[in-house]
Image: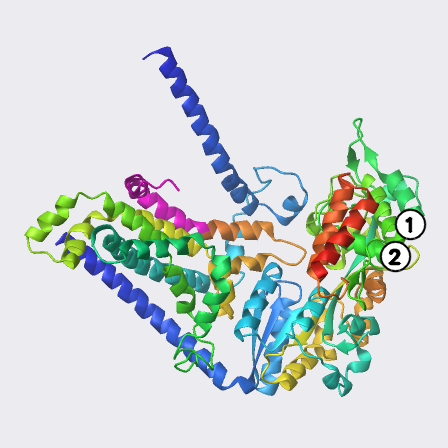
């Protein structure tokens, strides 16, 4: 191995270490702050090593509010959203990638326009649609008279399912499949639905892992939409519950960070289990971000 | 086989999820339908902050008692301060606003102009507690000659100083400075700088962010205002305003870049500043955690200029225009501001009230601190009640930053701020 190659490898490794440190540093601050006392935080002296490790901050933070309920709400919303999203997105992606039908491109680009619009712009119209959802929450068939899906799990879930990013990603993924697969399946007498179910779905593990993980993180971290739609403590998600540690003039940083650690754990564990598929999925869809 | 298994698992998961969702939805739906049907016996109250805030537990306790006494159900929702406008806007736009909202001075004019809150004069006239409401607190809840909000929790800033640092600098530690001139003189004497001229201990803590609070205090102390409420116009380019910002800039020279906008992290609590205007609740929390510091800290309502004035944030209750039963909503407000409820809050949380009937009780709890708080309430001002109050806050913060960082002179910054506000208003 030439000296030049060795040098390149060393520089690359140093760069990787620096980037890793930059990424890890905020997490270290998070953990360190979570284990400090109020007094130590207020002293203003910034140190990564707490004077005394106050592990009890974590159960104390979890004792402030009905956290099992908040976790249940977040988990329920996330599971339903992710499962529905995967089914809808992958089947729509398959249709756009493989099925010939009139207006396919126009429909696809229409869906893509939805991806360009930030949630803040469509928030109020979507909120009104949710409020005027017919026959639920005291509404009549015209969506009047009640509160529709406000303060209801489906009110949070439905708009989160309907995001075209997954359709785009699935389409890109399925377009990489050789067309011979479809032809062979057709020769065996498969319909379009059979091809999707029997051929494409079994080969979609990495797509589902990638899309599932992205959707899980996105749904789990939702803040503004659940804030708007929920009106009672019983419907709060974990992200909303974090506000319990933020007052008008003060922030209980140690408890806020302690609760944040507990909140990010499920997503972190999920990522560790799915990272192999996640990387495969990113590579095979040609997505980098 | 494998494919079938995977599909079966996904479908099962979806089914379980949907079933669970439906179960919960049905429950939520039933509750909400019931709420809609029985709206005459349910009051929805949205309050800012959290359950663990100073006022949170006592509000929940009072609401529980109210429900027991009246049989009326009260749904309380806590909304983070930063998100309250977003939440209100979507709720009012969709017709799902609550009956009662808790708000600050800054919100009153805007919500009145949007017709989101209703006048309370009719209820006030026949209200048994009306004479007990501190006049300054009543005035803060008025807009365009009508009463729109009932104050329940005044939260003033008081002036605090370090007696040990005063003594060390050869100043009389038994009293606070008594005029602007003395304040500046004391600040200069108390400031310690290193060999590079950098402030290592501030004579006075001037926040580099959210400086609007201090600017508001100083403009009132200078006998002027930054906004004419009656004309609904900014008055930022007056000689008094220039004098006020120049004085603020001189104080900032004795503060350096030490002070942040987060009150609990004020350098005053870190031995890095000798004087500061501090929200009374934050100061009390500090003294509770550091009881040995009580002897070292002196307090007064403010250091007067031409007039005595300090910042006084106030929490109000208002009845919304979407309330199906405004009488019942006002009845809840009346209960939450009754002597019994507020006395219990004073006793248990040590929070001041906007009503006379709790005044002595509150001062007796901790005469030194609480007398300063009551004096501050009496001379307290908040944001101007104009429909562009939120914009006013932003502009005021921006202009002070421009002056502190020498981007503009006080005259230029105030002139630009005046023009910017005028063009936005027009």
Q: Residue at x 72, y 48 (%)?
A: B398
- Can the viewer see residue A182? yes
B345 to the left or right of B373: left
Q: Which residue is mark 2?
A: B221
Neighbor class of circle 1 (other Cα within 10 Å; few <14, some 14-19, many 20+) is some
Instruction: Assign a secondary structure to mark 2.
Output: helix
Label 1 and label 2: CA atoms lie apart by 9 Å
Q: Would you place residue A285 above or below residue B106 in this image?
A: above
- Position in image of residue B180 (x %, y %): 91, 50
- Position in image of residue B293 (x %, y %): 78, 49
Q: Residue at x 40, y 16 (%)?
A: A7
Q: Residue furthest left?
A: A188
- Position in image of residue B31 (x %, y %): 45, 79
- The verdict on residue B236 being magenta is no
Q: Which residue is mark 1?
A: B180
Q: Would you place residue B8 above or below residue B266 in this image?
A: below
The magenta stretch spans which residues? A264-289
Is the magenta region chiefly helix, strand or loop? helix
- The verdict on residue A278 being magenta is yes
């Amino acid at each position: 191995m030439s000296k030049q190659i060795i040098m390149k490898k060393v520089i690359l490794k140093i760069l990787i270490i620096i980037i890793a440190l930059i990424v890890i540093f905020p997490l270290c601050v998070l953990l360190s702050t979570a284990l400090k006392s109020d007094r130590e935080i207020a002293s203003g002296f910034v140190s990564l090593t707490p004077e005394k490790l106050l592990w009890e901050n974590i159960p104390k933070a979890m004792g402030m509010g009905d956290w099992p309920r908040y976790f249940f709400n977040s988990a329920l919303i996330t599971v339903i959203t992710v499962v529905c999203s995967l089914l809808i997105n992958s089947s729509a992606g398959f249709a756009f990638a493989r099925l010939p039908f009139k207006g396919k491109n126009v429909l696809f680009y229409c869906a893509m326009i939805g991806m360009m619009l930030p949630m803040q712009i469509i928030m109020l119209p979507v909120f009104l649609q949710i409020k005027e959802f017919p026959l639920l929450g005291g509404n009549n068939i015209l969506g009047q008279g009640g509160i529709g899906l406000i303060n209801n799990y489906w009110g949070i879930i439905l708009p989160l399912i309907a995001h075209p990013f997954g359709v785009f990603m699935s389409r890109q993924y399925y377009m990489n499949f050789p067309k011979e697969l479809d032809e062979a399946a057709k020769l065996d007498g498969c319909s379009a639905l059979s091809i999707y179910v029997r051929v494409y779905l079994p080969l979609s593990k990495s797509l589902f892992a990638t899309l599932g993980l992205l959707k899980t993180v996105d749904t789990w971290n939702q803040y503004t939409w659940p804030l708007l739609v929920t009106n009672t403590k019983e419907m709060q998600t974990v992200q909303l519950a974090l506000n319990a540690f933020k007052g008008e003039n003060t922030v209980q940083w140690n408890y806020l960070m302690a609760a944040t650690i507990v909140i990010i754990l499920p997503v972190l564990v999920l990522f560790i289990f799915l990272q192999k598929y996640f990387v495969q999925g990113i590579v095979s869809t040609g997505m980098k971000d | 086989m494998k494919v079938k298994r995977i599909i079966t698992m996904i479908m099962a998961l979806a089914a379980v999820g949907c079933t669970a969702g439906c179960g919960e939805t049905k429950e939520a739906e039933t509750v909400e339908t019931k709420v809609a049907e029985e709206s005459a016996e349910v009051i929805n109250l949205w309050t800012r902050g959290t359950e663990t805030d100073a006022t949170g537990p006592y509000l929940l306790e009072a609401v529980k008692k109210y429900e027991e006494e009246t049989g009326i159900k009260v749904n309380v929702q806590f909304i983070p301060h930063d998100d309250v406008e977003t939440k209100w806007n979507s709720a009012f736009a969709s017709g799902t606003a609550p009956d009662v909202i808790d708000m600050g001075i800054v919100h009153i004019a805007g919500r009145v102009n949007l017709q989101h809150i209703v006048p309370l004069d009719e209820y006030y006239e026949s209200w048994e507690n009306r004479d007990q409401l501190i006049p300054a607190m009543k005035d803060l809840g008025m807009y365009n000659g009508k009463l729109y909000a009932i104050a329940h929790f005044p939260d003033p800033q008081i002036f605090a100083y370090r007696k040990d640092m005063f003594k060390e600098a050869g100043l009389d530690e038994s009293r606070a400075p008594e005029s602007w001139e003395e304040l500046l003189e004391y600040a200069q004497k108390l400031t310690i700088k290193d060999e590079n001229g950098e402030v290592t201990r501030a004579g006075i803590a001037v926040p580099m962010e959210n400086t609007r609070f201090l600017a508001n205090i100083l403009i009132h102390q200078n006998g002027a205002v930054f906004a004419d409420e009656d004309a609904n116009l900014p008055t930022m380019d007056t000689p008094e305003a220039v004098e006020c910002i120049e004085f603020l800039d001189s104080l900032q020279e004795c503060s350096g870049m030490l002070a942040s906008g987060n009150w609990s992290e004020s350098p005053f609590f870190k031995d890095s500043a000798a004087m500061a205007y501090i929200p009374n609740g934050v100061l009390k929390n500090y003294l509770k955690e550091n009881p040995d510091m009580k002897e070292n800290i002196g307090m007064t309502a403010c250091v007067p200029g031409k007039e005595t004035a300090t910042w006084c944030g106030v929490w109000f209750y208002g009845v919304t225009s979407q309330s199906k039963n405004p009488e019942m909503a006002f009845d809840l407000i009346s209960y939450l501001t009754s002597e019994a409820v507020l006395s219990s809050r004073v006793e248990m949380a040590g929070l001041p009230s906007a009503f006379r009937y709790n005044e002595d009780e509150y001062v007796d709890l901790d005469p030194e601190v609480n007398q300063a708080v009551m004096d501050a309430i009496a001379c307290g001002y908040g944001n101007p009640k104009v429909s562009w109050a939120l914009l006013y806050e932003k502009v005021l913060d921006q202009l002070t930053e421009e002056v502190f960082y020498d981007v503009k002179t006080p005259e230029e910054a105030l002139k630009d701020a005046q023009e910017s506000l005028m063009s936005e208003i027009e």
